[in-house]
Image: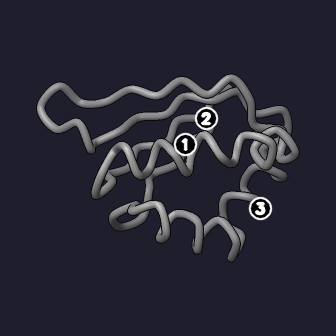
Amino acid sequence: MTINLKVKDYSTWRTGYDGREKSCVSAGITNGRRFRSAEDPNDLVILQDVADVAKARAWLGSDEMKVTMQKNGVVGSPTVRFAA
């Protein structure tokens, strides 16, 4: 899975991201790798392994995740893609 997103402040976002690792694993999402744009360090790409696409979609679309993204400074809606 790839996620492209923009955040207000990388440090704030990263603290929140690291704090929800157990929640990701429970949704079958593992092995997260984060990349920052050289031009804008708040423009991110995340690559993650997904065991169950339906479960991952449900977790990403949950109200809890929407609140978490807002709290951690995600700007707009992330672009999420699943690849085989």
Image side of residue 34 versus residue 50, left or right: left
Q: Say few, some or many: other residues with alpha carbon within 10 Å of mark 1 (under 14 / 14 to 19 / 20 or more).
A: few
From the image, tell me which residue sits under label 1: 81
Image side of residue 21 versus residue 8, left or right: right
Q: Which mark is residue 58?
A: 3
Location of residue 11 with respect to 33 vertically, above or below: below
> How many angstroms separate mark 2 from mark 3 (CA)?
14 Å
Kind of residue sitting beneath label 3: Ala
How far across and how far down the image is residue 15, in percent?
Answer: 51, 45
Kind of residue sitting beneath label 2: Met
From the image, tell me which residue sits under label 2: 1
Q: Nearer the viewer, residue 19 or 58?
A: 19
> How many angstroms separate mark 1 from mark 2 (CA)?
6 Å
Q: Nearer the viewer, residue 14 or 54?
A: 14
* Image quarter hosting the N terminus: top right
Residue that appears at 35% across and 38% down: 44
Marks counted in the figure total 3
How far across and how far down the image is residue 49, in percent?
Answer: 70, 27
Location of residue 66 with respect to 3 vertically, above or below: below
1 or 3: tag closer to the N-terminus: 3
Mark 1 touches mark 2? (CB < 8 Å): yes
Residue that appears at 71% across and 70% down: 62
- Could you say whether the residue bearing mark 1 is in a helix, strand or loop? strand
Image side of residue 61 versus residue 76, left or right: right
1 or 2: tag closer to the N-terminus: 2
2 or 3: tag closer to the N-terminus: 2
